[in-house]
Amino acid sequence: MERDDLVYRPLVIAHIIAALVYFGLVLLGGLAYSLQFLGKYPFPGIEFLSPGRVRMLHTNGAVYGFITNGFVAGLYWAVPRLTGYKVLNERLLGWFMFWALQAAVVATAVGLLAGFAQAVEWGETPIFVDPFVVVWLLLALVQFATPIYRHGKERSLYASNWYFIAGLIWIPMVYIMGNYFPQFFVPGIAGAAITGTWIHDAVGLYVTPIGWGLMYYFVPLLLRKPIWSHALSLLGFWGLAFFYPLQGVHHYLWSPIPMYAQYAAVFSTLALELAVVTVIVNFFMTLRGSGEVLKQSIPLRWMMIGIVNYAITCLQCAIQVLLTTQKVIHFTDWVVGHAHLIMFGVFGFWILGFFSYLWPRLMGREVYSRALDEWAFWLITIGVETMWVDLISGGLVQGFTWWGLNPWMDSVRFSIPFWFVRTITGLMIIAGFILYVYNIYMTSRKETAVAFQPQEA
């Protein structure tokens, strides 16, 4: 059986389209939220569309609408090829999971806008949605773990499958921990410590392992050569498993949480940087000698720029978790810039890279316009990188203004030029996204079909 026959393509297409629709809405929400800082908020006085609720819609839509749909599309493509087996049930369970995910995202959006958010950062999902999310996550575990388990009984697992199975097992556990324990069982300081753990575990034990797993599949595939070191890939995996779960309290440095927990979080964060370095080195050593491919392959370019951004954000993380640094940057736009670079500049870039590679193959057509691809890539890349520099710079200005005990309104006035640049860079990103989506749309309508040769990692 050809590897292409193992993949149920309509599901991959559906999840890609859903991801891009949500991403467009997320970008519009981010633009609207940024405009309030310039006194130009488009929905003044409308409680249902108040800035705080739109901000939660922006962040939750990014994770559950864009990133989750994007990752699921990648899993439906990669897992059958890596294992030689189809997922458990691609039609009945696959379509049920697709529509259930979209229903959960819409219910979350309506609940947030109606004021039913939980007081848990990254866990604002309304209480009445949480049980359905947990059930969906368990279904996803069964759907994708089945072919990995069958493959594992016959031969050793490739690094991608290690990351996939770990992420699929971890996320239901940490979701229950973060969304139920602080809300119902563990109040006060202990609950805050759990909330901080959930904030980081949502990224480190779900988004990171699934994202890295897909990268370990797609990058060697696009370079047409094996990953540089399988042993190094497993070293990075175990570093992630051991150190990431202990970092969450670094979101609450200088808080009433016991200092031993804060010191442990700082140590774990710094230790994880060593594991991250092994992963980054592995990918750049795989790229070594094949740099010219970046000139031709825009999908690979998205992925490798994402890896560069990952290195930057991890270095930044090692700096910002120091207690001295926290005195300056806490509650400033520095943190906002960091969050945008990791969630969009890394995982968002990887997803856009996956989509750029998959869409022509799903449609059986060449890309409609190479020029549009280039424009989309550069507009989004320059927009994201400039936004990051702008926000961390503005954050430093805010932090030192507060540290100097200046009047609080001084920090607001000093921040306005930075907020203006943020809105401009947001418009650049939206322009690039429009070109990206238009290119995908026109590729699907292109008359000339192309027979792509099946590829395996």
Image (cartoon, rainbow, N blue to C red):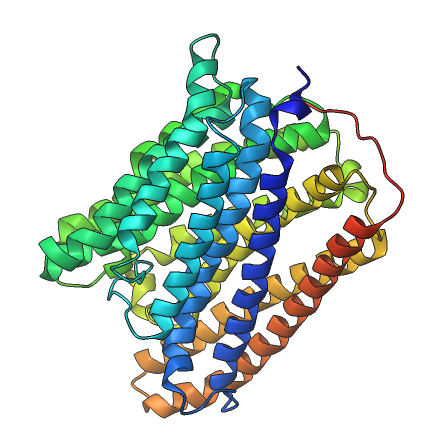
Depth check: give the residue in front, 222 or 433: 433
View extreme (top): residue = 154
Toward which corner of the image does residue 355 lie, by quadrant? top right
Q: Position of residue 411 (x, y in %)?
A: 40, 85
Total numbered labels: 0
Can the viewer see residue 277?
A: no
Q: Residue at x 63, y 49 (%)?
A: 352
Residue at image point 47% right, 7% down: 154
Q: Nearer the viewer, residue 92 or 136?
A: 92
Residue 207 position within the rendered picture, expressed as x and y whole percent measured from the top left: 44, 45
- Vertically, is 168 above or below 415? above
Q: Residue furthest front?
A: 92
Is residue 442 found left or right of 333 in the rendered image? right
In which quadrant will I find the C terminus? top right
Left or right: residue 125 compared with residue 303:
left
- Above or below residue 339? Residue 174 is above
Residue 454, quarter of picture: top right
| Residue 322 place in picture, x, y as percent | 31, 56
| Residue 453 placement (x, y as % from top left) | 79, 25
In the figure, is residue 116 to the left or right of 12?
left
Q: Is residue 55 above or below residue 106?
A: below
Residue 169 appears in the rendering: yes
